[in-house]
Every structure is written in C-alpha cells, then in structure tokens.
Image: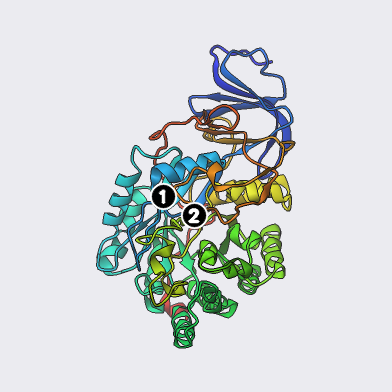
Amino acid sequence: MPVFRCSLDCIVSNGTVVTASDVGRYDIGIKDGKVMLLAPAFSLANVPAGRVIDAEGAYVMPGGVDAHVHLAEPELFGKGKPADDYTTGTRSAIAGGTTTIIAFAPQEKRETTVLKALDEAAAKAANNSFCDYSFHIIMTNPVRQALDEFTTLRERGISSVKIYMTYEALQLRDNQILDVLLQARTHKITTLIHAENGDMLNWMTDQLESRLLLAPKYHATSRPQILENEATNRAISLGQLIGAPILIVHVSSPAAAKTIRKAQTRGLPVYAETCPQYLFLTRKELERPGFEGAKCLCAPPPRDSTDDLEGIWRGLDNGTFTILSSDHCPFIYDDAETGKKSAITEDAPLGRFRYIPNGCPGVETRLSLVMGANRLTPQRFVEVTSTNPAKLYGLYPKKGALIPGVSDADLVIWYPSMEPFTLTNDLLHHNVDYTPYEGKTMSQWPRYTLVRGEVVWDRDNGGIVGSRGYGQFVKRESSYFCKDLPPWDVEAF
C-alpha cells in the first residue's frame, strides 16, 4: 500500500467505478478538488481522510455534463422568459447528478457584437451557481465585427456558437450560416445548429391558423419530421462545403437521425445531440385536455409514436448521437405574463400554439430517466452524458473523466438497488410549477453529487448541501474532435 505524507480530503470507498471505457472496483482518493488516485478497492482503508463515502454496491461515475441549458435569458421572441436563473437552474442540476452545465449567451439581433452577450451572461452566473458552468454564444447577427470577435471568444475560453435555421428573431439565412462556419473553422470553434426549416414552419403555421386550428396539439402538426430532416440535410451540406464541424442539437426525428448517420459514415465531422423528451414523450402528450398539452410543448416536438422513440434510442445506442443533453428550457405553466399561459386570449381560450413558449424543464431529470430505463450499458451512459459532452466542448479531461492528477473530482454516485418512487414536481428543485414526467415511476436517483470534491447533493441527509456561488466558470479549449485544418480554399471547388 502506498505511504501518504498527508491526509486526503475525501475517499470514495469500494465502489464500482464506471468511465466511458472501463468498469472496475476502486477506491477514489480526492485532494484539493482533484481526483488524486484510483486504487484497488479497500486499499485506502487506513488512509486518513476528512470524509469517507462508503460506495459498496454503488456505481461511481464522472459527474454529468449538460451541454444544453437555458437560464436567465432575455425574452427573445414573444412573451416567454425562462423561469430558472443560475441559482435555481444549477441547484436543480446538482440534485440530478449534473456537475457542469453549458448555458447560452444570446446576441440580440440589433447588436453587432457578441461580447456584450457574453458579459451579460457571465454577470448573471457569477457567484450564483451551485455547479461549474460555461457558455455557448447564440449568434443572431453575424456581421463582420461579431465574426472578428471569435478570436476574443477563444481567449476567454469560449469554443462554441449556436445558430438557428428558424424563428424570425434568431434565424440566419444560408449565406450567413456559411459566414459563421468559415470563421468557426478558422478558430476551431464548434457550431451548434437548430435544424428546422423556418419558412416551411411559418407556412404550415399560417395554414393551420387560417383553419382556426390553434390548440397546443397543432404545434406538432406545424413541425412534421420532413421539416426537421430537410434542415438537417441542408445544415450538413453547408458544413460540408466549409469542412467545419457541426453539432445538430435536440434531434427528435428518426428520419433526421438517419440523415446524420449517413453523413457520419461518409466521414463528415457531423455530431448530434438528443434529449430525454424524445426518448420518453410522444405527440399524445400535446393532446392532453384543455391547455395541459402546453406543458410538453417544445421544439422540435415529441414525435408520433413509440416507434419514433425506438428510433431515437437506437441512435443513442449505436453512436449516431454523440451526446445526451436536457435542453432545459423552463417556463412556468400557470403564468399569463411570461409563462405558458401567456398565449391564452379571449378569442383563443386554448391558446395559439405559435405563441406558446417553447421548452420543457429537464436538467434535474435527465440522468435519472435514462439511467433508470436500463437501455444503455453503464459505459455508454457515461459516454453520452458526461465524457462526450466534455470532449465535444473542450472540457475534457478536466471534466467527464476520472484521471488522477488531471480530472476534477466531479462525481455522481448511484445505488442501483434503491426503492422505486413516483416522481412529482414538489420533489424537484427548479423554479417551475410542473414536470413533463409527473407520475412516472423512477427506479434511479443520485445518492450523492460531488463538485470538485465537495458533496453538494446528499439525498438522504439534507438534499441540497452545496452552496450558491461555489460553481466556477470553466475556460474551455477547442473540441477534442476539432482537427488542425489548412485555410479554406475556394479554388478547390
């Protein structure tokens, strides 16, 4: 047994340690917020430590990395405004086993800079977060000044931008997308793309409204799978022209997943993300009585059938989907000012679906839903919920791994034999008055969450035991998947 000249801060003893590549029985020694060592089970039994967590019978995994979280954003279109700020949103994250989030800093359409958006998001997060965090820039006005600021973004530890192919307040035309992709290629920045055909969506919405088909369920009618698949194919083509890595976010359509899979088999740098709502919810959720369907209204919408759910599970299992995120975009249901019910008027008592704020809460339930489904191997679960997001967004191996001396001691500890329970919203820690998964039987929930060696969630002894403001901004490098490329050459075509 090694001889220690000082004590450890914490030992996680005799757990089944799961990483993206390995499963084994180990003790984990933690010092100064880092994984100091992995040692054979029980070998640290006599080493002094400030705290010892008995993990016998438990899975011990790297903490979750949720790379798609909307917090404290301004009203970008309509009346909707996310209900969670960096305090309530990250409080919810740690209760669900997530130790790092990447939220969004949205550029307003009239702005010629993206640095203002970054500064505003950073000010909202500072001293308010329970877990570590970073930002994606949402680009809505890719003028020369904003594009030239990519150099500064990289200096400040930001290595990803998001663009939209829909929504008037956010949508970029194809030539603008190409401008972003070219600059992103130059600076080794990963581009996230919301792939829905905005013109098709607007046309379908007008057709429905002209027939007075306004209720929440028609949100799905306005966004058929062909709309998502067309935009996905076009995004891939634009990326191929530039040779830039792209990530198609929140893929809901098995047809779009097949399009992505074909691009990947051709060797294109195309990555994809899906979310629990496309694994557990179907279009029937939008057909709940009255206005209740608005609770599950998100974009893209939950798809038609269990066959569609199976198609997304298949893509998660076979590697089509690089990552699993929550797309946590919370709006209070019973709120007529900035929540879901802001779409209800006297002449539309069931609301007008085009004005219902798009999004569902999910940062706290992401890991437990998928872990409890028992559809993925433990290693694959870690890969899509922690390691791959860390790699894709320049956090690895600081996050998403358990490498001694290198990785932060971010851990989530599960006891697979836990007693099942019924999920209700009052058990959750977000600032939202509902969960889309109300009444679902849960067979998994984290027992402990550790951020940089500190226990911040202890399910059986206090719940949230971490401190607001403990979370830190994490500077990111370029994507693990980004390659050094020569300058783009227009004459090559």
Q: Nearer the viewer, residue 353 or 69?
A: 353
Using the rendered image of the protein, determine whether residue 385 is visible from the camera's viewpoint.
yes
Q: Report x, y in % for residue 403.
A: 59, 35
Could you tell me the amino acid type at mark 2? Answer: His
Q: Can you tell which mark lies on residue 328?
A: 2
Q: Earlier in the sequence, mark 1 or mark 2?
A: 1
Q: Are the residues flagged by discs 1 and 2 in contact, CB closer than 8 Å?
A: yes
Picture residue at 36% right of the left edge, 60% below the top: 338
The residue positioned 37% from the left and 70% from the top of the image is: 170
Quick one: label 2, few (<14), some, or many (20+) residues within 10 Å? many
Q: Which residue does the image show at 44% across and 85% down from the upper left?
A: 206
Can you see residue 474? no
Report which residue position mark 1 lands on. Answer: 84
Quick check: 171 left or right of 421?
left
Question: Percent position (x, y) of residue 141?
Answer: 31, 69
Compared across the picture, whether 287 is left or right of 134 comes to right
* Residues packed near mark 1 inside 10 Å, few (<14), some (14 to 19) or many (20 plus): many
